[in-house]
Amino acid sequence: MTNRREFIKQVTAASIAAAIPGQIFAQRVTKKSNNELIWANLLHLSYNMWEDNTPLKYQTKSSPSNDCLETRMWAHCYQPELTFDKNAWDQLLKKMVDAGMNMVIIDLGDGVKYDSHPEIAVTGAWSPQKLMRELKKIREMGLEPIPKLNFSTGHKAWLGPYQRMISSDKYYAVCKNLIEEVCSLFDTPRFFHLGMDEETAVHQRNHENMVVRQGELWWHDFYYLVDLVEKQNVRPWIWSDYAWDHPDLFFEKMPKSVLQSNWYYGSQFENISNPLNEKYVRLYDQLEAHGFDQIPTGSNHSNDVNFGKTVEHCSKIISADRLKGFMQTTWRPTLAPCFKKHCEAIEQVANAIG
């Protein structure tokens, strides 16, 4: 995975609230305490968002290895059966609660047999009823479940046949059906994560079908998805990396109503010698300068210090009004061989919470 600051007058929290009916963002002078922040973890029900094909060596019903990296490589390829372990999931949720975390973002993908589009489901996908029972259990544990469907063409394999209909009338109809159904299943969640990251040719170099929306088409489709979510009285949430290469367009066109998650998984945040890394870290400052609400995202994907450093860095530069919390990402499937890696990620969040 590729590693994921012009100062202008900050907008007030009241102006942001005016753009988001039903949302109240209280203005603060001091930083939020840790128990006021979102401490989220991204977990995958489905992992079919990376490649749209499966090399012969990975065409097996389950991972051919007990090694986490090998398992990740296997799950990175399109798999027609659900790559998910319920026992690992249950234990991870409990560890999140014990760590003081309060939110789980669930990447659903084709891991649910949606009533509106059962044809995209993989073998072993959950029924809507099973998902709702699980959401009830998660809430009773003290965790807030948030849905994620990634609508980036760099992560489109979960859409099944519709991944080759991007920007068509049929595609728009399917997006509408899925977003409305998921919002209903989650009983009008506070947020809906739309993904929208890594829509480049480079990120699709191993895809059989490459699609990159550019210019006004990307914004047209993005606005369409945002509108669908907001019509459900839910706040859209995205990855912010479009701004890395299109900063002027991003800050001209991006609505303040959209919650932002920039991401950077390196270990250096100050005096960065690598200009690419400096670009990624600098976006946290730029988003703050332009008045966007943020949930910065860290990971133990590449090292074990990134999440703590992300919290330390962003807590200093983002105002309490706009710093909504932090997200941890492991970028590993929810499978037994990667259980230890997931646990290490949760422990890093616990250390940051203190």
Image (spheres, rainbow, N blue to C red):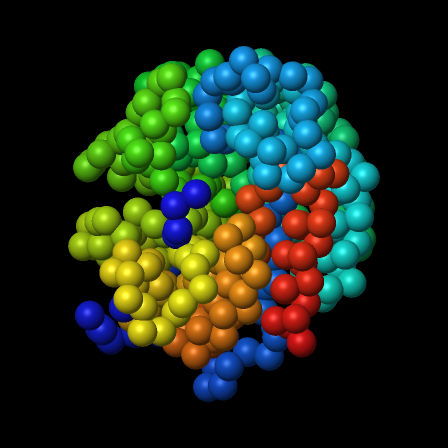
Q: Where's residue 118, x and y in %? A: 61, 17
- 57 over 326 or under it: above or below: above
- 80 over 320 or under it: above or below: above
Q: Is residue 28 left or right of residue 114?
A: left
* Closer to us: 324 or 341: 341
* Residue pictured at 39% horizontal, 45% vertical: 2
* Closer to us: 37 or 305: 305
Residue 47 visible here? no
* Closer to us: 322 or 3: 3
- 52 over 195 or under it: above or below: above
* Closer to us: 29 or 14: 29
Q: Where's residue 48, x and y in %? A: 55, 28
Q: Is residue 288 left or right of residue 173?
A: left
- The N terminus sits in image quarter: top left
- How many numbered dots are placed on residues in this image? 0
* Residue pictured at 32% horizontal, 23% vertical: 210
* Residue pictured at 22% horizontal, 73% vertical: 8
Residue 264 visible here? yes
Q: Is residue 62 left or right of residue 241?
A: right
* Residue pictured at 43% horizontal, 48% vertical: 238
Q: Where's residue 19, x and y in %? A: 38, 59
- The C terminus sits in image quarter: bottom right
Residue 304 placement: quadrant: bottom right
